[in-house]
Image (spheres, coloured by chain):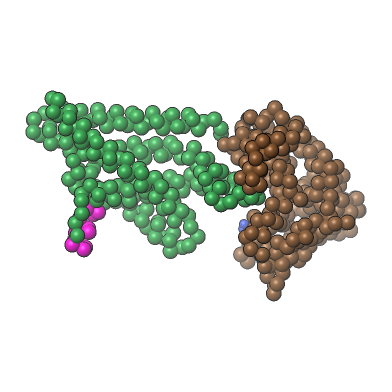
Chain colours: A green, B brown
Protein backbone atom coordinates (compact mmCIF):
# COMPACT_ATOMS: atom_id res chain seq x y z
CA UNK A 1 0.00 0.00 0.00
CA UNK A 2 2.79 2.41 0.90
CA UNK A 3 4.54 1.68 -2.39
CA UNK A 4 1.36 2.42 -4.23
CA UNK A 5 0.85 5.77 -2.56
CA UNK A 6 4.46 6.66 -3.33
CA UNK A 7 4.01 5.77 -6.99
CA UNK A 8 0.85 7.77 -7.14
CA UNK A 9 2.54 10.77 -5.57
CA UNK A 10 5.14 10.58 -8.32
CA UNK A 11 2.35 10.51 -10.89
CA UNK A 12 0.75 13.45 -9.11
CA UNK A 13 3.96 15.42 -9.46
CA UNK A 14 3.95 14.79 -13.20
CA UNK A 15 0.30 15.89 -13.37
CA UNK A 16 1.10 19.01 -11.40
CA UNK A 17 4.01 19.76 -13.73
CA UNK A 18 1.71 19.52 -16.73
CA UNK A 19 -0.79 21.68 -14.91
CA UNK A 20 1.56 24.47 -13.85
CA UNK A 21 3.63 24.56 -17.04
CA UNK A 22 0.44 24.79 -19.09
CA UNK A 23 -0.77 27.72 -16.99
CA UNK A 24 2.63 29.39 -16.99
CA UNK A 25 2.68 29.59 -20.78
CA UNK A 26 -0.96 29.68 -21.82
CA UNK A 27 -2.18 32.37 -19.42
CA UNK A 28 0.05 35.05 -21.00
CA UNK A 29 -0.10 33.54 -24.52
CA UNK A 30 -3.88 33.68 -24.35
CA UNK A 31 -3.57 37.45 -24.23
CA UNK A 32 -1.50 37.50 -27.39
CA UNK A 33 -4.10 35.32 -29.10
CA UNK A 34 -6.94 37.51 -27.83
CA UNK A 35 -5.17 40.57 -29.22
CA UNK A 36 -4.80 38.72 -32.52
CA UNK A 37 -8.49 38.01 -32.64
CA UNK A 38 -9.30 41.65 -31.89
CA UNK A 39 -6.83 43.28 -34.29
CA UNK A 40 -7.93 45.40 -37.21
CA UNK A 41 -5.45 43.58 -39.47
CA UNK A 42 -7.72 41.12 -41.22
CA UNK A 43 -5.31 38.30 -42.15
CA UNK A 44 -4.11 38.05 -38.56
CA UNK A 45 -7.66 38.06 -37.31
CA UNK A 46 -8.71 35.31 -39.74
CA UNK A 47 -5.69 33.21 -38.88
CA UNK A 48 -6.29 33.57 -35.15
CA UNK A 49 -9.94 32.78 -35.59
CA UNK A 50 -9.11 29.66 -37.61
CA UNK A 51 -6.67 28.52 -34.92
CA UNK A 52 -9.23 29.01 -32.15
CA UNK A 53 -11.88 27.16 -34.17
CA UNK A 54 -9.55 24.18 -34.64
CA UNK A 55 -8.58 24.09 -30.97
CA UNK A 56 -12.16 24.24 -29.79
CA UNK A 57 -13.56 22.07 -32.55
CA UNK A 58 -11.33 19.02 -32.16
CA UNK A 59 -10.66 16.75 -29.17
CA UNK A 60 -7.65 17.59 -27.03
CA UNK A 61 -6.67 13.92 -27.14
CA UNK A 62 -6.33 14.18 -30.92
CA UNK A 63 -4.27 17.35 -30.60
CA UNK A 64 -1.91 15.57 -28.18
CA UNK A 65 -1.38 12.77 -30.68
CA UNK A 66 -0.91 15.30 -33.47
CA UNK A 67 1.73 17.30 -31.64
CA UNK A 68 3.60 14.18 -30.64
CA UNK A 69 3.63 12.41 -33.99
CA UNK A 70 3.38 15.21 -36.57
CA UNK A 71 7.01 16.37 -36.27
CA UNK A 72 8.13 12.79 -36.83
CA UNK A 73 5.97 12.17 -39.88
CA UNK A 74 6.55 15.62 -41.36
CA UNK A 75 10.23 16.18 -40.66
CA UNK A 76 11.49 12.88 -39.39
CA UNK A 77 12.35 14.33 -35.99
CA UNK A 78 10.87 13.07 -32.79
CA UNK A 79 10.99 14.76 -29.46
CA UNK A 80 10.40 14.14 -25.83
CA UNK A 81 6.81 13.09 -25.08
CA UNK A 82 6.59 15.36 -22.07
CA UNK A 83 7.56 18.40 -24.18
CA UNK A 84 5.04 17.40 -26.83
CA UNK A 85 2.40 17.11 -24.14
CA UNK A 86 3.15 20.61 -22.80
CA UNK A 87 3.13 22.08 -26.31
CA UNK A 88 -0.28 20.53 -27.03
CA UNK A 89 -1.77 21.69 -23.74
CA UNK A 90 -0.38 25.21 -24.11
CA UNK A 91 -1.59 25.56 -27.69
CA UNK A 92 -5.02 24.25 -26.71
CA UNK A 93 -5.48 26.22 -23.52
CA UNK A 94 -4.18 29.47 -25.00
CA UNK A 95 -7.13 29.34 -27.38
CA UNK A 96 -9.64 28.87 -24.56
CA UNK A 97 -8.06 31.54 -22.38
CA UNK A 98 -7.98 33.89 -25.38
CA UNK A 99 -11.74 33.62 -25.73
CA UNK A 100 -12.20 34.36 -22.05
CA UNK A 101 -9.87 37.36 -22.22
CA UNK A 102 -11.55 38.67 -25.34
CA UNK A 103 -15.01 38.57 -23.80
CA UNK A 104 -13.59 40.26 -20.70
CA UNK A 105 -11.80 42.97 -22.65
CA UNK A 106 -14.87 43.65 -24.76
CA UNK A 107 -17.10 43.87 -21.71
CA UNK A 108 -15.21 46.92 -20.43
CA UNK A 109 -17.05 50.11 -21.24
CA UNK A 110 -15.46 52.19 -24.00
CA UNK A 111 -15.72 55.16 -21.66
CA UNK A 112 -12.96 53.67 -19.50
CA UNK A 113 -10.50 53.82 -22.39
CA UNK A 114 -11.69 57.29 -23.35
CA UNK A 115 -11.40 58.68 -19.83
CA UNK A 116 -7.89 57.25 -19.57
CA UNK A 117 -6.91 58.75 -22.93
CA UNK A 118 -8.27 62.18 -22.06
CA UNK A 119 -6.42 62.13 -18.73
CA UNK A 120 -3.19 61.49 -20.61
CA UNK A 121 -2.34 57.95 -19.49
CA UNK A 122 -0.09 56.06 -21.89
CA UNK A 123 -1.46 53.02 -23.70
CA UNK A 124 0.51 50.58 -21.57
CA UNK A 125 -0.47 52.31 -18.33
CA UNK A 126 -4.11 52.33 -19.39
CA UNK A 127 -4.00 48.62 -20.13
CA UNK A 128 -2.18 47.42 -17.03
CA UNK A 129 -3.54 49.83 -14.40
CA UNK A 130 -6.99 50.82 -15.62
CA UNK A 131 -8.31 48.02 -17.85
CA UNK A 132 -6.62 44.77 -16.83
CA UNK A 133 -7.66 44.78 -13.15
CA UNK A 134 -11.28 45.23 -14.19
CA UNK A 135 -10.98 42.49 -16.79
CA UNK A 136 -9.51 40.07 -14.26
CA UNK A 137 -12.36 40.66 -11.85
CA UNK A 138 -14.92 39.94 -14.56
CA UNK A 139 -13.32 36.83 -16.01
CA UNK A 140 -12.38 35.17 -12.74
CA UNK A 141 -15.41 32.80 -12.68
CA UNK A 142 -14.87 31.68 -16.28
CA UNK A 143 -11.15 31.34 -15.68
CA UNK A 144 -11.84 29.21 -12.60
CA UNK A 145 -13.97 26.81 -14.63
CA UNK A 146 -11.26 26.48 -17.24
CA UNK A 147 -8.51 25.83 -14.71
CA UNK A 148 -10.61 23.14 -13.03
CA UNK A 149 -11.10 21.53 -16.43
CA UNK A 150 -7.35 21.65 -16.92
CA UNK A 151 -6.74 19.68 -13.71
CA UNK A 152 -8.93 16.90 -15.08
CA UNK A 153 -7.56 17.21 -18.62
CA UNK A 154 -4.03 16.47 -17.42
CA UNK A 155 -5.16 12.82 -17.33
CA UNK A 156 -5.13 12.90 -21.14
CA UNK A 157 -1.34 13.26 -21.14
CA UNK A 158 -1.15 9.46 -20.81
CA UNK A 159 -2.38 9.20 -24.42
CA UNK A 160 1.17 9.83 -25.58
CA UNK A 161 2.71 7.90 -22.74
CA UNK A 162 3.33 10.55 -20.11
CA UNK A 163 3.29 8.80 -16.73
CA UNK A 164 0.90 11.13 -14.98
CA UNK A 165 -1.36 10.30 -12.06
CA UNK A 166 -4.14 8.55 -13.91
CA UNK A 167 -1.81 6.34 -15.93
CA UNK A 168 0.00 5.29 -12.77
CA UNK A 169 -3.35 4.48 -11.18
CA UNK A 170 -4.50 2.41 -14.16
CA UNK A 171 -1.25 0.47 -14.30
CA UNK A 172 -1.42 -0.26 -10.59
CA UNK A 173 -5.05 -1.19 -10.92
CA UNK A 174 -4.48 -3.85 -13.56
CA UNK A 175 -1.36 -5.14 -11.81
CA UNK A 176 -3.18 -5.65 -8.54
CA UNK A 177 -6.56 -6.62 -9.99
CA UNK A 178 -8.15 -3.84 -7.93
CA UNK A 179 -10.05 -0.65 -8.67
CA UNK A 180 -8.76 0.97 -5.46
CA UNK A 181 -5.89 2.87 -7.17
CA UNK A 182 -8.38 4.42 -9.60
CA UNK A 183 -10.49 5.71 -6.74
CA UNK A 184 -7.42 6.96 -4.91
CA UNK A 185 -6.55 8.92 -8.07
CA UNK A 186 -10.07 10.31 -8.05
CA UNK A 187 -9.53 11.56 -4.51
CA UNK A 188 -6.24 13.19 -5.61
CA UNK A 189 -7.96 15.04 -8.47
CA UNK A 190 -10.74 16.09 -6.15
CA UNK A 191 -8.30 17.53 -3.61
CA UNK A 192 -6.43 19.43 -6.30
CA UNK A 193 -9.63 20.92 -7.63
CA UNK A 194 -10.85 21.71 -4.15
CA UNK A 195 -7.72 23.79 -3.65
CA UNK A 196 -8.11 25.43 -7.06
CA UNK A 197 -11.72 26.39 -6.47
CA UNK A 198 -10.96 27.68 -2.96
CA UNK A 199 -8.21 29.87 -4.41
CA UNK A 200 -10.57 31.28 -7.01
CA UNK A 201 -13.28 31.94 -4.42
CA UNK A 202 -10.67 33.72 -2.33
CA UNK A 203 -9.55 35.84 -5.29
CA UNK A 204 -13.15 36.70 -6.14
CA UNK A 205 -13.71 37.81 -2.55
CA UNK A 206 -10.56 39.87 -2.61
CA UNK A 207 -11.72 41.67 -5.76
CA UNK A 208 -15.23 42.06 -4.41
CA UNK A 209 -14.48 45.43 -2.86
CA UNK A 210 -15.91 47.27 -5.83
CA UNK A 211 -18.59 46.81 -8.44
CA UNK B 1 -8.53 89.60 -24.86
CA UNK B 2 -6.53 86.43 -25.19
CA UNK B 3 -7.90 83.66 -27.37
CA UNK B 4 -7.72 80.23 -25.78
CA UNK B 5 -9.12 78.15 -28.63
CA UNK B 6 -9.54 78.84 -32.30
CA UNK B 7 -11.26 76.24 -34.48
CA UNK B 8 -11.59 76.86 -38.19
CA UNK B 9 -13.30 74.90 -40.94
CA UNK B 10 -13.50 71.60 -39.08
CA UNK B 11 -14.71 68.69 -41.21
CA UNK B 12 -15.30 65.08 -40.20
CA UNK B 13 -16.68 62.09 -42.08
CA UNK B 14 -17.62 58.71 -40.72
CA UNK B 15 -17.43 56.51 -43.79
CA UNK B 16 -19.68 58.11 -46.40
CA UNK B 17 -21.43 60.40 -43.93
CA UNK B 18 -20.28 63.99 -43.56
CA UNK B 19 -20.85 64.46 -39.82
CA UNK B 20 -19.16 67.85 -39.46
CA UNK B 21 -19.26 70.05 -42.54
CA UNK B 22 -17.64 73.32 -41.54
CA UNK B 23 -17.37 74.14 -37.85
CA UNK B 24 -15.57 77.27 -36.71
CA UNK B 25 -15.57 79.06 -33.38
CA UNK B 26 -13.23 80.72 -30.93
CA UNK B 27 -13.22 80.71 -27.16
CA UNK B 28 -11.61 83.59 -25.29
CA UNK B 29 -9.68 82.93 -22.12
CA UNK B 30 -11.96 82.94 -19.09
CA UNK B 31 -15.10 82.63 -21.21
CA UNK B 32 -17.76 79.96 -21.42
CA UNK B 33 -19.11 78.71 -24.72
CA UNK B 34 -22.34 76.78 -24.80
CA UNK B 35 -23.19 74.45 -27.65
CA UNK B 36 -26.78 73.39 -28.20
CA UNK B 37 -28.44 71.39 -30.92
CA UNK B 38 -30.50 68.27 -31.55
CA UNK B 39 -29.15 64.78 -31.03
CA UNK B 40 -26.93 63.67 -33.89
CA UNK B 41 -25.96 67.18 -34.92
CA UNK B 42 -22.26 66.54 -34.23
CA UNK B 43 -21.76 68.24 -30.85
CA UNK B 44 -20.01 65.27 -29.23
CA UNK B 45 -17.89 64.63 -32.28
CA UNK B 46 -16.68 68.24 -32.18
CA UNK B 47 -15.63 67.93 -28.52
CA UNK B 48 -14.10 64.51 -29.16
CA UNK B 49 -11.94 65.91 -31.95
CA UNK B 50 -10.75 68.81 -29.79
CA UNK B 51 -9.93 66.42 -26.92
CA UNK B 52 -8.24 64.00 -29.35
CA UNK B 53 -10.62 61.07 -29.01
CA UNK B 54 -11.18 61.37 -32.77
CA UNK B 55 -9.10 62.76 -35.61
CA UNK B 56 -10.21 65.68 -37.74
CA UNK B 57 -10.44 65.20 -41.51
CA UNK B 58 -9.94 68.87 -42.35
CA UNK B 59 -9.64 72.17 -40.53
CA UNK B 60 -7.32 74.01 -38.19
CA UNK B 61 -7.32 74.03 -34.41
CA UNK B 62 -5.18 76.16 -32.13
CA UNK B 63 -5.30 75.77 -28.38
CA UNK B 64 -3.40 78.20 -26.17
CA UNK B 65 -1.36 79.35 -29.14
CA UNK B 66 -0.32 75.86 -30.18
CA UNK B 67 -1.57 74.00 -33.22
CA UNK B 68 -3.17 70.59 -32.81
CA UNK B 69 -3.98 70.27 -36.50
CA UNK B 70 -3.70 72.49 -39.51
CA UNK B 71 -5.61 72.38 -42.76
CA UNK B 72 -3.23 71.59 -45.59
CA UNK B 73 -4.30 70.61 -49.08
CA UNK B 74 -7.83 69.84 -47.94
CA UNK B 75 -6.69 67.61 -45.07
CA UNK B 76 -5.86 68.23 -41.45
CA UNK B 77 -2.23 67.62 -40.55
CA UNK B 78 -1.21 66.72 -37.00
CA UNK B 79 2.15 67.69 -35.49
CA UNK B 80 3.21 64.31 -34.05
CA UNK B 81 2.68 62.41 -30.83
CA UNK B 82 4.78 64.52 -28.48
CA UNK B 83 3.16 67.83 -29.37
CA UNK B 84 -0.30 66.21 -29.50
CA UNK B 85 0.16 64.84 -25.98
CA UNK B 86 1.29 68.18 -24.63
CA UNK B 87 -1.67 69.95 -26.19
CA UNK B 88 -3.88 67.18 -24.80
CA UNK B 89 -2.75 68.09 -21.31
CA UNK B 90 -4.26 71.55 -21.82
CA UNK B 91 -7.73 70.11 -22.42
CA UNK B 92 -10.04 68.22 -20.07
CA UNK B 93 -13.32 66.47 -20.81
CA UNK B 94 -16.24 65.63 -18.55
CA UNK B 95 -18.43 62.85 -19.92
CA UNK B 96 -22.16 62.34 -19.76
CA UNK B 97 -21.59 58.92 -18.19
CA UNK B 98 -18.89 60.04 -15.70
CA UNK B 99 -16.53 57.17 -16.60
CA UNK B 100 -14.92 57.02 -13.18
CA UNK B 101 -12.53 54.12 -12.61
CA UNK B 102 -14.63 51.71 -10.52
CA UNK B 103 -11.69 49.89 -8.93
CA UNK B 104 -10.14 53.08 -7.53
CA UNK B 105 -11.31 55.04 -4.53
CA UNK B 106 -12.58 58.54 -5.13
CA UNK B 107 -9.24 59.89 -3.96
CA UNK B 108 -7.24 57.67 -6.29
CA UNK B 109 -9.51 58.56 -9.21
CA UNK B 110 -8.32 62.14 -8.71
CA UNK B 111 -4.66 61.49 -7.85
CA UNK B 112 -3.78 58.77 -10.37
CA UNK B 113 -3.27 60.96 -13.44
CA UNK B 114 -1.59 63.68 -11.39
CA UNK B 115 0.98 61.13 -10.33
CA UNK B 116 1.36 59.00 -13.46
CA UNK B 117 1.01 61.74 -16.06
CA UNK B 118 2.14 64.95 -14.37
CA UNK B 119 4.62 63.14 -12.10
CA UNK B 120 3.42 64.93 -9.00
CA UNK B 121 4.40 63.50 -5.65
CA UNK B 122 1.93 61.62 -3.48
CA UNK B 123 1.45 64.41 -0.96
CA UNK B 124 1.00 67.10 -3.55
CA UNK B 125 -1.49 65.00 -5.55
CA UNK B 126 -3.51 64.11 -2.47
CA UNK B 127 -3.50 67.67 -1.21
CA UNK B 128 -4.78 68.87 -4.56
CA UNK B 129 -7.42 66.12 -4.65
CA UNK B 130 -8.67 66.95 -1.16
CA UNK B 131 -8.87 70.65 -2.02
CA UNK B 132 -11.00 69.81 -5.04
CA UNK B 133 -13.17 67.39 -3.09
CA UNK B 134 -13.82 70.09 -0.51
CA UNK B 135 -14.81 72.43 -3.27
CA UNK B 136 -17.23 69.77 -4.54
CA UNK B 137 -18.59 69.19 -1.04
CA UNK B 138 -17.33 65.62 -1.07
CA UNK B 139 -14.37 65.61 1.31
CA UNK B 140 -16.00 62.82 3.35
CA UNK B 141 -16.16 60.58 0.27
CA UNK B 142 -12.41 60.37 -0.43
CA UNK B 143 -12.22 56.73 0.65
CA UNK B 144 -15.47 55.63 -1.00
CA UNK B 145 -15.70 53.73 -4.25
CA UNK B 146 -17.65 55.17 -7.18
CA UNK B 147 -20.46 52.59 -6.86
CA UNK B 148 -21.18 53.92 -3.37
CA UNK B 149 -21.96 57.41 -4.70
CA UNK B 150 -25.04 58.93 -6.31
CA UNK B 151 -24.86 59.95 -9.96
CA UNK B 152 -24.50 63.59 -9.00
CA UNK B 153 -21.65 62.80 -6.62
CA UNK B 154 -19.93 60.67 -9.26
CA UNK B 155 -20.17 63.50 -11.75
CA UNK B 156 -18.67 65.93 -9.24
CA UNK B 157 -15.79 63.51 -8.68
CA UNK B 158 -15.24 63.29 -12.43
CA UNK B 159 -15.15 67.09 -12.62
CA UNK B 160 -12.58 67.11 -9.80
CA UNK B 161 -10.59 64.44 -11.65
CA UNK B 162 -10.45 66.65 -14.74
CA UNK B 163 -9.64 69.82 -12.78
CA UNK B 164 -6.81 68.11 -10.90
CA UNK B 165 -4.67 68.26 -14.04
CA UNK B 166 -5.12 72.05 -14.28
CA UNK B 167 -6.45 72.07 -17.84
CA UNK B 168 -6.39 75.39 -19.65
CA UNK B 169 -9.84 74.63 -21.02
CA UNK B 170 -12.47 72.19 -19.82
CA UNK B 171 -15.15 70.59 -21.99
CA UNK B 172 -18.45 69.17 -20.80
CA UNK B 173 -20.46 66.79 -22.99
CA UNK B 174 -24.01 66.80 -21.64
CA UNK B 175 -22.80 66.51 -18.04
CA UNK B 176 -26.31 66.30 -16.60
CA UNK B 177 -28.12 64.18 -19.18
CA UNK B 178 -27.77 61.02 -17.07
CA UNK B 179 -29.10 62.73 -13.93
CA UNK B 180 -32.52 63.51 -12.52
CA UNK B 181 -33.51 67.18 -12.03
CA UNK B 182 -32.30 67.48 -8.47
CA UNK B 183 -28.86 66.02 -9.19
CA UNK B 184 -28.74 68.12 -12.35
CA UNK B 185 -28.99 71.26 -10.21
CA UNK B 186 -26.03 70.03 -8.13
CA UNK B 187 -23.84 69.80 -11.20
CA UNK B 188 -25.03 73.04 -12.75
CA UNK B 189 -24.12 74.79 -9.52
CA UNK B 190 -20.59 73.43 -9.73
CA UNK B 191 -20.16 74.48 -13.37
CA UNK B 192 -21.58 77.89 -12.56
CA UNK B 193 -19.07 78.39 -9.76
CA UNK B 194 -16.26 77.42 -12.14
CA UNK B 195 -17.56 80.01 -14.58
CA UNK B 196 -17.49 82.59 -11.82
CA UNK B 197 -13.83 81.72 -11.24
CA UNK B 198 -13.22 82.42 -14.94
CA UNK B 199 -12.41 78.84 -15.86
CA UNK B 200 -12.39 78.59 -19.66
CA UNK B 201 -15.05 76.08 -20.66
CA UNK B 202 -17.22 74.75 -23.46
CA UNK B 203 -20.46 73.08 -22.45
CA UNK B 204 -22.73 70.92 -24.57
CA UNK B 205 -26.08 70.95 -22.81
CA UNK B 206 -29.84 70.74 -23.16
CA UNK B 207 -30.33 72.99 -20.12
CA UNK B 208 -31.33 76.13 -21.98
CA UNK B 209 -31.78 78.48 -19.03
CA UNK B 210 -28.50 77.38 -17.56
CA UNK B 211 -26.67 77.83 -20.85
CA UNK B 212 -28.09 81.30 -21.27
CA UNK B 213 -27.14 82.26 -17.73
CA UNK B 214 -23.53 81.09 -17.65
CA UNK B 215 -22.20 81.44 -21.17
CA UNK B 216 -20.53 84.34 -22.88
CA UNK B 217 -21.25 82.97 -26.32
CA UNK B 218 -23.59 80.31 -27.68
CA UNK B 219 -23.74 78.13 -30.76
CA UNK B 220 -26.66 76.23 -32.25
CA UNK B 221 -25.57 73.23 -34.33
CA UNK B 222 -27.68 71.10 -36.64
CA UNK B 223 -26.68 68.62 -39.31
CA UNK B 224 -22.97 69.19 -38.84
CA UNK B 225 -23.02 72.94 -39.34
CA UNK B 226 -23.41 75.96 -37.07
CA UNK B 227 -26.86 77.23 -37.94
CA UNK B 228 -26.76 80.25 -35.66
CA UNK B 229 -24.47 81.77 -33.06
CA UNK B 230 -24.26 84.84 -30.92
CA UNK B 231 -24.55 86.33 -27.47
CA UNK B 232 -26.69 84.00 -25.36
CA UNK B 233 -29.45 86.55 -24.81
CA UNK B 234 -29.77 87.02 -28.55
CA UNK B 235 -29.56 83.35 -29.47
CA UNK B 236 -31.93 82.09 -26.78
CA UNK B 237 -34.39 84.96 -26.60
CA UNK B 238 -34.39 86.29 -30.12
CA UNK B 239 -33.21 83.59 -32.54
CA UNK B 240 -33.17 84.61 -36.19
CA UNK B 241 -33.34 81.25 -37.90
CA UNK B 242 -36.49 79.17 -37.98
CA UNK B 243 -34.58 75.99 -37.08
CA UNK B 244 -33.15 77.63 -33.98
CA UNK B 245 -36.56 78.92 -32.97
CA UNK B 246 -38.12 75.48 -33.36
CA UNK B 247 -35.37 73.82 -31.39
CA UNK B 248 -35.50 76.27 -28.47
CA UNK B 249 -39.30 76.23 -28.48
CA UNK B 250 -39.28 72.44 -28.14
CA UNK B 251 -37.59 72.90 -24.75
CA UNK B 252 -39.99 75.57 -23.53
CA UNK B 253 -42.87 73.15 -23.92
CA UNK B 254 -41.06 70.34 -22.12
N1 LIG C 1 -17.63 56.47 -34.38
C1 LIG C 1 -18.66 56.77 -35.20
N2 LIG C 1 -18.85 56.05 -36.33
C2 LIG C 1 -19.87 56.36 -37.16
N3 LIG C 1 -20.76 57.35 -36.96
C3 LIG C 1 -20.62 58.09 -35.85
C4 LIG C 1 -19.57 57.84 -34.91
N4 LIG C 1 -19.68 58.74 -33.91
C5 LIG C 1 -20.74 59.52 -34.21
N5 LIG C 1 -21.32 59.12 -35.37
C6 LIG C 1 -22.47 59.76 -36.02
O1 LIG C 1 -22.20 61.12 -36.14
C7 LIG C 1 -23.38 61.88 -35.94
C8 LIG C 1 -23.13 62.95 -34.89
O2 LIG C 1 -22.93 62.31 -33.65
P1 LIG C 1 -22.62 63.11 -32.33
O3 LIG C 1 -21.43 63.96 -32.54
O4 LIG C 1 -22.57 62.13 -31.24
O5 LIG C 1 -23.90 64.03 -32.20
P2 LIG C 1 -24.49 64.76 -30.91
O6 LIG C 1 -23.47 64.71 -29.83
O7 LIG C 1 -24.79 66.14 -31.39
O8 LIG C 1 -25.74 64.03 -30.56
C9 LIG C 1 -24.49 60.92 -35.57
O9 LIG C 1 -25.28 60.68 -36.70
C10 LIG C 1 -23.74 59.68 -35.19
O10 LIG C 1 -24.48 58.54 -35.50
MG1 LIG D 1 -23.62 63.84 -27.91
Q: Is residue B28 above or below residue A20?
A: below
Q: Quadrant of residue B105?
A: top right
Left or right: A72 as drawn, with respect to B26: left
Q: Quadrant of the N terminus of chain B?
A: bottom right
Is residue B98 visible to the viewer in this orientation of the structure?
A: no
Q: In this view, which residue lies farthest toward the top?
A: A1
Left or right: A65 as drawn, with respect to B245: left
Q: Residue at x 84, y 42 (%)?
A: B197
- Residue closer to the observer: A21 or B183: A21
- Residue closer to the observer: A189 or A25: A25
Left or right: A170 as drawn, with respect to B107: left
Q: Position of residue A148 (x, y in %)?
A: 34, 36
Q: Position of residue A47 (x, y in %)?
A: 39, 60
Q: Is residue A80 above or below residue B56?
A: above
Q: Is residue B252 above or below residue A48?
A: above
- Give the dominant element type of the magenta stretch: helix, strand or loop: helix
Q: Quadrant of residue A2?
A: top left
Range of the magenta residues? Answer: A65-76
Is residue A109 visible to the viewer in this orientation of the structure?
A: yes
Left or right: A198 as drawn, with respect to B112: left
Q: Residue at x 74, y 36 (%)?
A: B132
Residue B193: within the magenta? no
Q: In this view, which residue lies farthest toward the bottom?
A: B73
Q: Position of residue B51 (x, y in %)?
A: 69, 54
- Residue closer to the observer: B228 or A159: A159
Amino acid sequence: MQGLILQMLEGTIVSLKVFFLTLLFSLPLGFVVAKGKMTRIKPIRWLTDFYIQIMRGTPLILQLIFFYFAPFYLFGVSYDRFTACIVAFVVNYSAYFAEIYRSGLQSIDRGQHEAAKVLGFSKAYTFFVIILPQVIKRILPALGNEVITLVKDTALAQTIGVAELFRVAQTASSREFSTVPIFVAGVFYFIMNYIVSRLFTLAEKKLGYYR
Amino acid sequence: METMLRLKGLKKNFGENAILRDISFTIEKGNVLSIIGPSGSGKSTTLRIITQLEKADDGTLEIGGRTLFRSYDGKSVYPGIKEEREIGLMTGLVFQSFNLFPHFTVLRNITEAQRAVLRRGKDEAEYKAMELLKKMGLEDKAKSYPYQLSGGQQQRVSIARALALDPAILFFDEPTSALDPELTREILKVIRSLAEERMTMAVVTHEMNFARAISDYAIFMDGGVIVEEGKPDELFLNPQMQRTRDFIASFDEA
